[in-house]
Image (tube, helix red, strand yellow):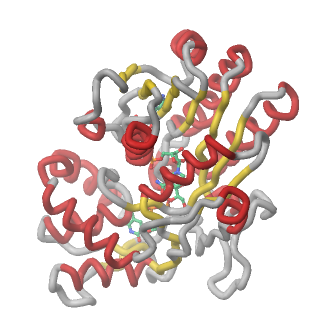
């Protein structure tokens, strides 16, 4: 695979993957990104111009997508509307990008015969009880809760149908919650870090007992490259790093890092339909493809992430006020 098209490559995880690809392979990389509010050109700074080019365009625009896909051996598809809270405010761009956009890409890879890897989420499986001994596996039934997760579930099903009906050479991965540098301040961990830096208090939805299974975005990238190289066509792989923490624990770790009292946060209005717990069993990826995560110590990964946000205030500060105003309007 000499020529790889990465959709959403100017976003949080897609850009990390582009850096990973450039470091780990000799591939020529094209990023196709609409540069929505969630994107940042800064994420791609420092990459060699001889290896990486950015095409600004919409994955739902067949006129852009079809000729571009035809120039590449493989497409790694990260582009999406990605934030649950936004999908509760306005689901429309989620349907357009996550469903129509994925459909448009699938039609293009069908015509071009390109390899396709679809990046998806553990949220397609719904949620687990706090005391459920089982975790999500590739055999778990689909049961998405939000407009975001239902459009991601629909996009997964489109990929599966294009494999079976048209012989498209595709794989799918469903990953747990990512953290690390360059994540938009609307998301949980960056929001709480930047609230503290800005002199405010972290905001916990409800009681804060909801559990997420955290993985460093570098580990997500290495898993996707492993699947792209050695995954079996038509197969789904779950990606996770055994990082379960409840939201209250994460907020307390952030407060402790800054030397603030552990109760120095606000409980705010809960998210509608808030999934209780996600947890990934990544045995298939580990045993069949030999992948393993490197960033296994969540506390030190979080500390490094906090330091990164402190050092990159000029990057997130321009977006902070509007994000907080949108949350405040919903009592969050
Ligand atoms: P993000 O919101 O940070 O980035 C999304 C990128 O897609 C942005 O650069 C945006 O400009 C681009 N984009 C959006 N609509 C587009 C369109 N119509 N055409 C072209 N580009 C478009 O998202 P992220 O957190 O980096 O997530 C990337 C992918 O990983 C998504 O598919 C998401 O569902 C999946 N995922 C995310 C997580 C997580 O914890 N963030 C976990 C598992 C899976
Ligand atoms: O599980 C994978 C998913 O993880 C990805 O598919 C999504 O793209 C990604 O956004 C993420 O979804 P979540 O909804 O789990 O992430 P978020 O950062 O929005 O919230 C994490 C948890 O923190 C969740 O239980 C809601 C809670 N929360 C969130 C915010 C923004 C708060 O308590 N306070 C907040 O201010």
- Residue 25 lies, with reference to residue 142, above or below; the image says above
- Compared with residue 282, is residue 298 higher up or lower down, i.e. above or below? below
Say which residue appears at 34% left-offset and 38% top-offset: 39
Residue at the location (44% across, 43% down)?
Answer: 24
**Depth check: 268 or 282 in front?**
282
Residue situated in front as seen by the camera: 118 or 315? 118
Q: Quadrant of residue 174 in the image?
A: bottom right
The image quadrant that residue 169 belongs to is: top right
What residue is at 50 percent from the left and 55 percent from the top? Answer: 220
Q: From the top left corner, tell me how far across and down residue 182 is, in percent.
A: 30, 50
User: Quick one: quadrant of the C terminus?
Assistant: bottom left
Residue 319, position as x, y percentages in the image: 22, 47
Residue 144 visible in the snapshot? no
Q: Residue furthest front?
A: 26
Looking at the image, which residue sits at the far right?
165
Residue 165 against residue 290 in the figure, above or below: above
Residue drawn 39% across and 37% down?
22
Corner quadrant of residue 1: top right
Q: In the image shown, does 91 or 60 lie closer to the viewer?
A: 60
Q: Quick check: 62 above or below 99?
A: above
Tell me how many marks there are. 0
Is 135 placed left or right of 329 in the picture? Answer: right
Q: Position of residue 250 (x, y in %)?
A: 37, 78
Residue 309 seen in this snapshot: yes
Residue 53 point in image, percent of width and height: 36, 22
Is residue 201 left or right of 188 when viewed as pictured?
A: left
């Amino acid at each position: 695979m000499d020529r790889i098209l990465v959709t959403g490559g100017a976003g949080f995880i897609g850009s990390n993957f582009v850096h990973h690809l450039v470091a780990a392979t000799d591939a020529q990389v094209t990023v196709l990104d609409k540069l929505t509010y969630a994107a940042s050109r800064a994420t791609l700074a420092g990459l060699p111009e001889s290896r990486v080019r950015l095409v600004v365009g919409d994955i739902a625009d067949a006129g852009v997508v079809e000729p571009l896909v035809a120039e590449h051996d493989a497409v790694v598809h990260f582009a999406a509307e990605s934030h649950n809270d936004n999908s509760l405010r306005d689901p429309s761009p989620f349907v357009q990008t996550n469903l129509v956009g994925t459909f448009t890409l699938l039609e293009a890879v069908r015509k071009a015969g390109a390899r396709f890897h679809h990046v998806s989420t553990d949220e397609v499986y719904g949620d687990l009880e706090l005391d459920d001994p089982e975790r999500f596996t590739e055999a778990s039934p689909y049961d998405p809760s939000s407009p975001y997760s239902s459009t991601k579930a629909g996009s997964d099903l489109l990929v599966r149908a294009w494999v079976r009906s048209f012989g498209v050479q595709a794989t799918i991965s469903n990953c747990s919650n990512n953290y690390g540098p360059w994540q938009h301040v609307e998301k949980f961990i960056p929001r709480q870090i930047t609230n503290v830096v800005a002199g405010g208090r972290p905001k916990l939805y409800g009681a804060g007992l909801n559990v997420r299974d955290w993985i460093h975005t570098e580990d997500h990238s290495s898993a996707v490259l492993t699947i792209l190289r050695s995954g079996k066509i038509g197969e789904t792989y779950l990606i996770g790093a055994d990082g379960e923490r409840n939201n209250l624990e994460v907020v307390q770790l952030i407060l402790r890092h800054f030397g603030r009292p552990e109760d120095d946060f606000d409980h705010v209005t809960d998210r509608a339909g808030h999934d209780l717990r996600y947890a990934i069993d990544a045995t298939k990826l580990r045993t069949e493809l030999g992948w393993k995560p490197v960033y296994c110590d969540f506390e030190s990964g979080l500390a490094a992430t906090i330091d990164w946000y402190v050092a990159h205030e000029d990057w997130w500060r321009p977006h902070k006020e509007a994000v907080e105003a949108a949350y405040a309007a919903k009592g969050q």
